[in-house]
Amino acid sequence: MARRSSLPVTFVVPTIAILLVLSMVPTLYAIVIALQNRELSSTDYSWVWLSNFQDLLFDRRFLNAVWVSVKWEVVTVVATMVVAIGLGVLMFEVASPRLRNLYCLLFIIPVLLPRVSAAFVWKFAYHPLYGIATYPYRLITGGLIFDPLSKPSTALFAVASVDVWQWGLFFAVIVLKLLETLPPQPIEAARLDHAKRWQIHAYVTLPMLKAPLISLMFVKMIESLRSFDLIYVMTRGGPGVATETLDMYAFSQGFIESGKVSYASAMAVLMMIATVISFTMLWKRVQA
Amino acid sequence: MKPYRLAASLSAAFVLTASISTMALGAPVCSAPVKVLAQPRDGLTLLEDSKDEFTKLSGAGFQIDYLNENDRRAKSRADASTVGNYNVYYVDEANVALFASSKWIVPLADYYPADYDYADFDPGRQKVATYDGKVWFAPLTGGGDLMVYRKDVLEAAGIQPPKTLDELIADVPKLTDASKGMYGIALRGARGSGANVWRWMPFFKAYGGKWFDGDKPVFNSDAAVKATETYLKLFKDSAPGTQTGSWDESTGAFLSGQVAILVESTPLSGMAVDPKTSQVVGKIGFLPPPSPLPGGGYGHGLAIAAKANADDASKKCAGLFIAWATSKENEKRRLDAHQFGELNRTSILSSKEFAGIYGADLGQALAETGKATAVNFWQDPRWPDLGDRWGIILEELVTGTRTDIKGGLNELDAYANELVKKK
């Protein structure tokens, strides 16, 4: 009995210990630094306790970054899910099995591209004079210039479109495969009741896929929090601060502008707390 | 006494023989490859072709990692203050004060072999490389500003090349014809002390701007407001893509034939006359920046990292690499490869070969612009922080996310006061 009960402990404890060290040490270190006034250019520092957090409340760029991060999260997650479900259903309804396989192959390619490469490709595509994405506008308007990455009103959406291009298409493949795994009986029953195609999906298939779709949404929410590389390459947070998310601003304060690592850590800590709270609340809500 | 003398003589002979043997064998200066963090430069790319030469000279090779300007600045700052992975940093006029005062780099003169003749570098660039009375880097590029203009476009518009700032402001809108893809000017909108702020500073200085009134920062002066208003006014005729672009975008627009007048750093002139990089060869003229715009004196170069070179031998190795990389021989190779922007030595700039390649006009314009070149930025370790802060606000103003010039400058002034108090 004793040997049997000790086996799980033998396997679980080292794993948990490693995970704790890997996750807790940097987290605790970030919290400690956030309570100090460390700067890259100096080895001197002192404890300032909550002063960095207090300063953040009056920092207009921080408040802007919070708002941009919320917009980014909402836009990318909603658009990705809409594209994924729309395209997934479309492929399921319209395409033959052979075509579906071809589409799946094509739709997976964008997500296989490294983020930085995708960002560079689209940055050139959005060039106001030579970009392929801005060419139709030039053609229709007789050569008028449209520079989506330089306009505060369009920059965030232009960058978000790249994120959706990568993840929306990939998720569409997953949605298609999920639809293919559903039992055919409920769908056939709905057809016999003369339900229209959109009704079948709205009231039968998608509700049946609620759990995996919510999981997909959570995956995308976490992924969207890590879009630093995409934004950094395409706009560096500009124009002005129009696409400056919290991680961009924290990096900027820590390593680009002033070397204020403590101030940057305070932002990281706040981000972590906000993420944990909001994700927990959302998770509980969908579980309810 | 005799045995002692004999022993002393033998010892001396042994030491001498050992020294000569070591020299004859060419004891390697470097024990490991030199790691360099730099930004892309044609001169450095060319240097990589001669890697074997350095290996023979030092006993080890080198590895250069390239990042664009802003990334290079961020990465070198992070590396120097933490792990210290690189033996040599590419530094520039804007961050040499920070790197030197933070002791992230060491004075170069102690480790720069005398044979490589540091005094041969252009005196202006030597000045930029000097901080607190010590030389910190060997120049890879540098200079001031030149006005490069399209002769054909100005002639067609019946406009003489502007000689004053007022003329420039008046001429630029007349030269813009968006339907033909022609823009009066190209400026830099992208944030950064070395990007949009760099191009804005000559306007600030031209209107009599000063960073300090005694010990008090005056970053929100009337001169700063007027300079910003002028900059934003000119930006209305700046080529597309420059609103969030920097050197690459503005020079790229000029070299591809979309811009009539460009006031930019001197390397542009070499690119503009090179058919490999320019579509406007034979159509351009050079003049100093319209008066009273001062040229922005600058210099980039290689410095010895402090952390990665913990002992004297490593510092000597890094010093040898820097000396070799910026040597007359390598600079001659850059001249032969028509890399105008990579030339820094007076012996090369005044050579017959240089005059033969670039012509007398450019030489004259360079000589004249030298008189108007000045150090426009605040030479202080806190400058990158402050300059970047202004860069963000200026980018916001350029792209229209904010419109209150005075409010933006007040914000900058408040931040400057905060920084000054901290010292």
Image (cartoon, coloured by chain):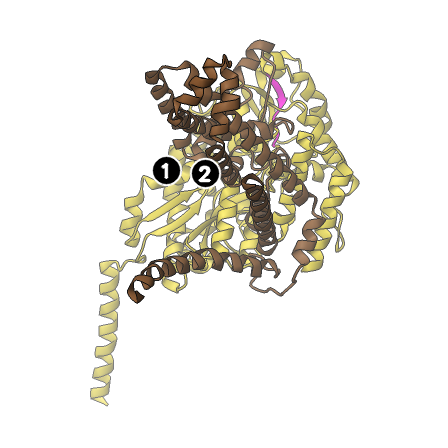
Q: Is label 1 on the same chain as label 2?
A: yes
Element assignment for label 2 = helix
Left or right side of B374 for B310: left
Closer to the camera in the image, A260 or B322? A260
Left or right side of B40 for B47: left
The image shows residue B197, relative to residue B130, as above or below, that is above
Q: Quadrant of the C terminus of chain A?
A: top right
- What residue did someone put label 2 on? B342
| Furthest residue in direction right, as rendered | B222
| Furthest residue in direction bottom, as rendered | B1
- Does residue B185 belong to the magenta stretch? yes
Q: Can the viewer see residue A185?
A: yes
Q: Are marks 1 and 2 in contact (CB under 8 Å)?
A: yes
Can you tell which quarter of the image residue B87 is in? Answer: bottom left
Closer to the camera in the image, B420 or A273? A273
Residue drawn at point x = 22 percent, y = 83 percent: B7
Q: Which mark is residue A16?
A: none
Q: Which chain is brown?
A: A
Residue drawn at point x = 50 percent, y = 52 percent: B78
Residue B146 percent location from the top left of the image? 58, 32
Amino acid on which the number 2 mark rests in the picture? Glu
Closer to the camera in the image, B73 or B356? B73
- What residue did someone put label 1 on? B46
Left or right side of B280 for A34: right
**Circle 1 chain:** B
Closer to the camera in the image, A55 or B57? A55
- Residue stretch rendered in magenta on the structure: B182-188
**Circle 2 chain:** B
The image shows residue A224, relative to residue A194, as above or below, that is below
